Structure formats: structure tokens, C-alpha cells
Amino acid sequence: MNIPFHLAIGVSDLEKARQFYGNILNAKEGRSSHLWVDFNFFGHQLTCHLIKAQITSALNSNPVDNRDVPIPHFGVTLSAQEFDKIENRLREQGISFFIEPQIRFKNKTGEQKTMFFKDPFEHFIEIKSYTKKQEY
């Protein structure tokens, strides 16, 4: 059973959030107010709340398959076609990758394409696609 998650994050500018999540990641906007906006983030609810505090990405990481994976991060698992579409859209928009698109766990259980990038508010996002049957 696929149950959507809800994630609320802080942003310093709702219009920048609309540009990034709505236009670049193609997330459909839902309800909103002058203090927050909901997005359909690949079938899940992402709420961007306007906050006044300075957002920083004090980098913590854990080694995963010889790469330093940023903590915290959030993301989704997509089909190979959707992964490629997002990768191409990010490249077209000049978004820098924190970890370039690559194959992780090659020839092992859980082999996957993965990429990491940041939104304009310093939140790390991972998009992945399993190369075989989905394995967690």
C-alpha cells in the first residue's frame, strides 16, 4: 500500500519556493496562504512555511557507498524515466548537484541511480531510481 507522507519545511520566500518546487520540479501547487504553500511532491504533500529565521545547511553526513551523503535530506524514489526527466530539467535550469547523478551499490542489492541537490533554502533533496525491482 502506498501511503503519501507529509513534510513541512521552512522557506524564506514563498515565490522562490513556487519557482523551484512548482516550475523546476513540476510539483503542482495546492492550498496556500500568505504564510505557507502546499505542493504535490511526486504524490506526497510538501508544505513550505514562511519563516523569518536564517536557514543554514550545517552539513552533517554519513558515508554511503563511498560518498558523503548529507544529513538531513528528503526525497523520493521514481521510475527511471521520471528520474531522467528530473535530471534533465535540473541541468536545463542550471541547478548544481551536490552529488552528481550516478549508480550507487553497483551490482549489489539496492542498486540505484541517485542524485542530490539543494533547493534555494539549503534543504538537501535526493532523487533515486532503483535499477531492478524496488529493494529497500
Image (cartoon, grey):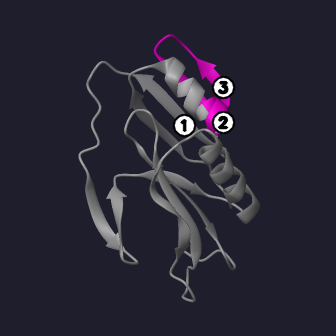
- Where, by quadrant of the figure, is residue 49 drawn? top left
Q: Which residue is mark 1?
A: 46
Label 1 Cα crowd, 10 Å radius (few <14 / some 14-19 / many 20+): many
Q: Name above or below for residue 26 compared with residue 109.
A: above
Instruction: Identify the element where label 1 is drawn.
Output: strand
Residue 87 picture location, percent across and down: 63, 53
Q: Name above or below for residue 42 compared with residue 13.
A: below
Q: Residue furthest right?
A: 81
Q: Which residue is mark 2?
A: 27
Which amino acid lies under the numbered mark 2 shown in the image of this protein? Ala
Label 2 Cα crowd, 10 Å radius (few <14 / some 14-19 / many 20+): many
Residue 100 picture location, percent across and down: 50, 61
CB under 8 Å between callouts 3 and 2?
no
Does the magenta run of residues contain 39?
yes
Name the residue: 58% across, 25% down.
Answer: 18
Residue 123 picture location, percent across and down: 40, 42
- Where, by quadrant of the figure, is residue 61 drawn? bottom left
Q: Which mark is residue 134?
A: none
Q: Please give the range of residues in magenta.
A: 22-40
Name the residue: 52% across, 59% down.
Answer: 115
Name the residue: 31% across, 72% down.
Answer: 63
Name the residue: 56% across, 32% down.
Answer: 20
Which amino acid lies under the numbered mark 1 shown in the image of this protein? Leu
Earlier along the polypeptide chain: callout 2 or callout 1?
2
Instruction: Identify the element where label 2 is drawn.
Output: loop
Q: Which residue is mark 3?
A: 30
CB under 8 Å between callouts 2 and 1?
yes
Q: Name above or below for residue 36 compared with residue 39.
A: above
- Where, by quadrant of the figure, is residue 60 drawn? bottom left
Q: Quadrant of the N terminus?
A: bottom right
CB under 8 Å between callouts 3 and 1?
no
